[in-house]
Amino acid sequence: MLIFGDPHAGTVLMQADPRVGLELPLRMVVWRRDGATHIGYEEPEGLDEAYDLAGLEETLVRMGGLLAQLAAEATMVRAA
Protein backbone atom coordinates (compact mmCIF):
# COMPACT_ATOMS: atom_id res chain seq x y z
CA MET A 1 0.00 0.00 0.00
CA LEU A 2 1.41 3.35 -1.07
CA ILE A 3 -0.07 6.57 0.27
CA PHE A 4 0.20 9.89 -1.57
CA GLY A 5 -0.83 13.26 -0.24
CA ASP A 6 -0.46 16.90 -1.13
CA PRO A 7 -1.59 19.04 1.82
CA HIS A 8 -2.41 21.98 -0.42
CA ALA A 9 -4.60 20.02 -2.84
CA GLY A 10 -6.21 17.91 -0.13
CA THR A 11 -7.02 20.94 2.03
CA VAL A 12 -8.73 22.71 -0.87
CA LEU A 13 -10.84 19.64 -1.57
CA MET A 14 -11.76 19.14 2.11
CA GLN A 15 -12.69 22.82 2.46
CA ALA A 16 -15.14 22.35 -0.40
CA ASP A 17 -16.60 19.16 1.09
CA PRO A 18 -15.12 17.75 4.31
CA ARG A 19 -16.52 14.28 3.51
CA VAL A 20 -13.91 13.85 0.77
CA GLY A 21 -11.42 13.39 3.62
CA LEU A 22 -12.60 9.76 3.66
CA GLU A 23 -10.87 9.35 0.28
CA LEU A 24 -7.66 11.19 1.14
CA PRO A 25 -4.78 10.78 1.05
CA LEU A 26 -4.77 8.90 -2.23
CA ARG A 27 -3.83 5.23 -2.03
CA MET A 28 -2.33 2.77 -4.46
CA VAL A 29 -1.93 -0.98 -3.99
CA VAL A 30 0.97 -2.73 -5.73
CA TRP A 31 1.45 -6.51 -5.92
CA ARG A 32 3.23 -9.15 -7.99
CA ARG A 33 1.51 -12.20 -9.37
CA ASP A 34 2.74 -14.66 -11.95
CA GLY A 35 5.84 -12.56 -12.63
CA ALA A 36 3.86 -9.39 -13.39
CA THR A 37 3.44 -6.22 -11.38
CA HIS A 38 -0.16 -5.13 -10.80
CA ILE A 39 -1.37 -1.80 -9.49
CA GLY A 40 -4.80 -0.81 -8.27
CA TYR A 41 -6.18 2.59 -7.32
CA GLU A 42 -9.39 4.57 -7.40
CA GLU A 43 -9.57 7.30 -10.04
CA PRO A 44 -9.84 10.65 -8.24
CA GLU A 45 -11.67 12.17 -11.21
CA GLY A 46 -14.86 10.45 -10.05
CA LEU A 47 -14.81 12.10 -6.64
CA ASP A 48 -16.65 15.15 -7.98
CA GLU A 49 -19.69 12.94 -8.57
CA ALA A 50 -19.72 11.63 -5.00
CA TYR A 51 -18.83 14.88 -3.24
CA ASP A 52 -19.57 18.59 -3.69
CA LEU A 53 -16.35 19.51 -5.51
CA ALA A 54 -17.72 21.73 -8.29
CA GLY A 55 -14.99 23.87 -9.77
CA LEU A 56 -12.20 21.59 -8.56
CA GLU A 57 -12.22 19.17 -11.48
CA GLU A 58 -8.77 20.33 -12.63
CA THR A 59 -7.29 19.38 -9.25
CA LEU A 60 -8.85 15.92 -9.50
CA VAL A 61 -7.56 15.47 -13.06
CA ARG A 62 -4.02 16.42 -11.96
CA MET A 63 -4.23 13.93 -9.08
CA GLY A 64 -5.41 11.23 -11.47
CA GLY A 65 -2.60 12.06 -13.88
CA LEU A 66 -0.03 11.64 -11.13
CA LEU A 67 -1.40 8.21 -10.18
CA ALA A 68 -1.51 7.11 -13.81
CA GLN A 69 2.07 8.26 -14.37
CA LEU A 70 3.30 6.46 -11.27
CA ALA A 71 1.47 3.29 -12.29
CA ALA A 72 2.93 3.43 -15.80
CA GLU A 73 6.46 3.94 -14.51
CA ALA A 74 6.14 1.18 -11.93
CA THR A 75 4.98 -1.40 -14.47
CA MET A 76 7.34 -0.40 -17.29
CA VAL A 77 9.63 -3.22 -18.39
CA ARG A 78 13.18 -1.94 -18.62
CA ALA A 79 15.59 -3.37 -21.16
CA ALA A 80 18.92 -4.47 -19.73
Image (cartoon, grey):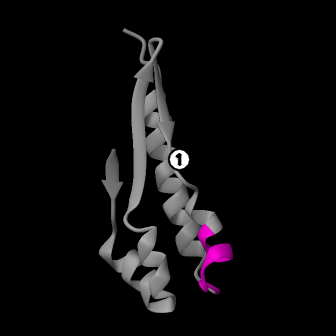
Judge left or right: residue 48 versus residue 22. right
Q: Residues within 10 Å of mark 1 (few under 14, many from 20)?
A: some
User: What residue appears at the point 42 percent right and 47 percent down from the top-left corner?
Assistant: 28
Q: Residue furthest bottom?
A: 15
| Residue found 59% across the figure and 83% down from its top | 53
Per the image, is 52 magenta? Answer: yes
Which residue lies at the image location 55% right of the left edge and 69% below the top edge?
A: 60
Answer above or below: position of 24 versus 27. Answer: below
Q: What is the three-letter code of the residue carrying label 1?
A: Ala
Quarter of the figure with the N terminus: top left
In the structure shown, which secondary structural element does the residue marked by tag 1 occupy? helix
Which residue is the site of mark 1?
Answer: 68
The image position of residue 29, as x and y in percent, is: 41, 42
* Location of residue 41 with respect to 62 vertically, above or below: above
In front of the other: 45 or 17: 17
**Residue 6: quadrant of the picture:** bottom left
Give the magenta part as a residue range. 47-54
